Image: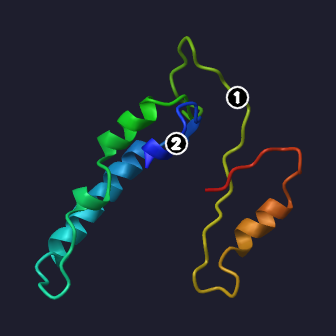
């Protein structure tokens, strides 16, 4: 996936993403282990489909990046403190008539001159 990005792509890494990537990878391994014995529905090995967390972060380091550290992070040289608010919770409501309703309402209220990223 990262080879599709231009070399100057700025990547923003949020607080806790490393732990979330490790947790996700563990869940993928567990699910694969529990389902891999079904001969009628063979599975790809996780490494054939997903990058390992260390591969993801090695690829991120090859690009300019912003690390969102949180209010209690140690301040060092080269770290800028930006006055920001935490993002709102905008879950996709899969069973709702409009699953992206919360996201749409949030974006409708964002000032057109203020950048916003929803991912």
Q: Which mark is residue 67?
A: none
Colour style of the rendered protein structure: rainbow
Q: Can you give x and y, in whole percent of width and height, for residue 83 in the image? A: 74, 32
What residue is drawn where x is 53% and y is 14%?
76
Read off the residue under disc 1: 82
**Structural crowding at the residue carrying mark 1, measured as other residues with C-alpha within 10 Å and reported as few (<14), some (14–19) or many (≥20):** few
Asked which quadrant contains residue 41, the reply is bottom left
Asked which quadrant contains residue 8, the reply is top right
Q: Is residue 69 left or right of residue 54?
A: right
**Structural crowding at the residue carrying mark 2, measured as other residues with C-alpha within 10 Å and reported as few (<14), some (14–19) or many (≥20):** few
Q: Is residue 44 left or right of residue 19?
A: left
Q: Nearer the viewer, mark 1 or mark 2?
A: 2
Going from N to C along the chain, the mark reached first, 1 or 2, is 2
Q: Can you give x and y, in whole percent of width and height, for residue 17 in the image? A: 45, 45
Q: Which mark is residue 5?
A: 2
What residue is drawn where x is 57% and y is 14%?
78
Q: Can you give x and y, in whole percent of width and height, for residue 9 in the image? A: 58, 36
Compared to residue 45, the image places residue 78 above or below, namely above
Compared to residue 53, the image places residue 74 above or below, namely above
């Amino acid at each position: 996936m990262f080879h599709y990005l231009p070399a100057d792509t700025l990547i923003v890494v949020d607080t806790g993403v490393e732990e979330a990537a490790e947790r996700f990878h563990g869940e993928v391994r567990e699910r694969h282990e529990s389902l891999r014995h079904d001969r009628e529905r063979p599975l790809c090995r996780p490494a054939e489909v997903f990058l390992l967390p260390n591969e993801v972060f090695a690829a991120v380091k090859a690009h300019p990046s912003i690390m969102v550290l949180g209010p209690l992070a140690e301040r060092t040289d080269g770290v800028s403190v930006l006055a920001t608010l935490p993002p709102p919770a905008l879950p996709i409501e899969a069973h709702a008539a409009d699953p992206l309703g919360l996201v749409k309402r949030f974006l409708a209220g964002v000032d057109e001159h203020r950048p916003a990223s929803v991912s």
